Amino acid sequence: MTTIDNKDISKATLNRLPSYLKYLYQLDKLNVATVSSTTIANGLNLNPVQVRKDIALVSSVAGKPKMGYVTKEIIADLEGFLGYNNTHDAILVGVGGLGKAFLGYGGFENYGLNIVAAFDNNEKLVNTKINGKPVYDVSKLQSIVARFNIQIGIITVPSYAAQEVADRMVAAGIKAIWNFASVHLNIPSDVALKNEDLASSLALLSLQIQSNRKDG
């Protein structure tokens, strides 16, 4: 559980909040001034009661009967709670296909993430720039992290190299790791870890497709 202003925020709630924000961004672009918890729930296939409870934990203003929430106010509250209005610098290790895609994706900055540098052991990539981001030899990771006080590390290397990279990040002082390698990482308890297993996600999608075909 995460405690914010004496309120307990469960991991399940934390996982839902970015979805709320993304949905509200879409409504704001359509100039929808107010939104109800029921509307949000229907848009995201969630329970309205759960949505109201989640928003109550982070919102500075309660929703009004028959009107709901002011869209821009809820967006501001969610951005503030999630830290999207405070840019966090990050480094990325592994400039393969996925790593290059990340370096070319400008949307991270909308969510408060700024990749300032990348690292690889490929001599053809070292000392080059990809989409304006410098690529260094992985041996320089600790000095770059210390120089710029980087807190977040992104791992996009093959599975066999991921633990070594994680160890380097921890030794350098990284406090949060976003791991895209399909492998379990052993890290200290005081370092935050978020795993994104693309292979497992694809397998789940394939199973869902097969299930839908059988049902049809």
Image: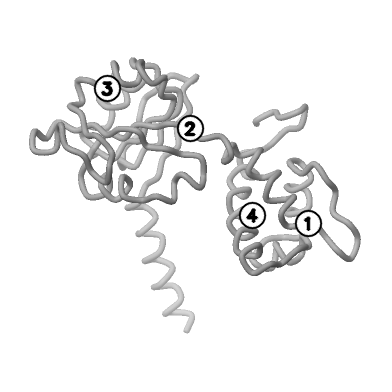
Decide which of 50, 127 is in the foreground and name it: 127
Amino acid type at circle 3 is Leu
Corner quadrant of residue 159: top left
Decide which of 99, 15 is in the foreground and name it: 99
Q: Please name which of the two marks, 4 or 1, marks the residue nearer to the observer.
A: 1
Q: Dot 1 lies on which element?
A: strand
Percent of width and height locating residue 31? 68, 67
Q: Is residue 130 above or below residue 22?
A: above
Q: Please name which of the two marks, 3 or 4, marks the residue nearer to the observer.
A: 3
Q: Mark number for residue 20?
A: 4
Horizontal arrangement in the rendering, residue 135 relative to residue 122 (left or right): right
Q: Mark number for residue 88?
A: 2
Quarter holding the N terminus? Answer: top right
Dot 4 crowding, Cα within 10 Å, few <14, some 14–19, many 20+ = many
Q: Residue at x 61, y 50 (%)?
A: 16
Percent of width and height locating residue 200? 36, 52
